[in-house]
Image (cartoon, rainbow, N blue to C red):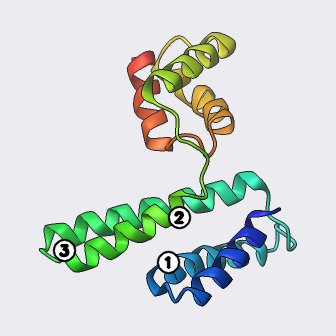
Amino acid sequence: MSLSDKIDQDIKKAMLARESKKLEALRAIKAELLLAGTEKKAAGKISGQTEMQILQKLVKQRKESAGLYREKGREDLAATEEFQSDVIEKYLPEQLGEGEIKTILADIIKETGASGIKDMGKVMGMATKKLSGKADNKTIADLAKQMLG
């Protein structure tokens, strides 16, 4: 079952259960997936990797918004954003811990022969492919810089 099909089923369930907050988050996912599918290069089909990138982007947006709302003292809006973030995260694969990411990065560094920060591009290219959906790119970049620097 594709992600779009699963989202459609969950939208129906949320509608029947009258879960308006959950429904809002699911509709946001559906809208982004439809938008990605209508792009010229997508030709109606999007890859699993692209789906995971879209979900990660949505989660990141929600978390950043929640942080901004908290700074401005709007706990009600922050709670809504965090709830939506939690709903969206359920469709992502389990996120890797820092130790697991470092192990994978060490293998990539050996494989590419990276020797310093100048080789960051090579390492990040392979790391984003291997860790797509399993780790945040910012975390990967920070750990790669530590290991190469």
Mark 1 or 2 closer to N-term? 1
- Which class describes the residues within 10 Å of circle 2: few (<14), some (14-19), or many (20+)? many
Quarter placement of the C terminus: top left
- Frontmost residue, 70 versus 2: 2
Ranked by sequence position, the earlier of labels 3 and 2 is 3
Q: In the rendered image, which residue does mark 3 sit on?
A: 75
> Does 117 sit above or below residue 60?
above
Q: Specify the amino acid type for callout 3.
A: Glu
| Residue extending farthest left | 73
Which residue is found at the position 23% from the left and 68% from the top? 68
Q: Which mark is residue 116?
A: none
Query: Picture quarter containing residue 65?
Result: bottom left
Residue occupied by mark 2: 88
- Locate residue 92, reporting x and y percent: 59, 53
Q: In this view, does 146 lie to the left or right of 124?
A: left
Sequence-wise, which precedes: disc 1 or disc 3?
A: 1
Report the Cα–Cα distance between label 1 and label 3.
18 Å
Q: Residue type at mark 1: give it.
A: Lys
x and y, in percent, of residue 113 in the image: 63, 11
- Horizontal side of residue 120 vs 111, given as left or right: left
Q: Name the residue under label 1.
A: 22
Q: Which residue is drawn at 72% across and 76% down?
A: 9
Measured in 3D between alpha carbons, the distance from the residue under mark 3 to the one under mark 2, in whole angstroms, is 20 Å
Picture residue at 58% right of the left edge, 32% below the top: 124
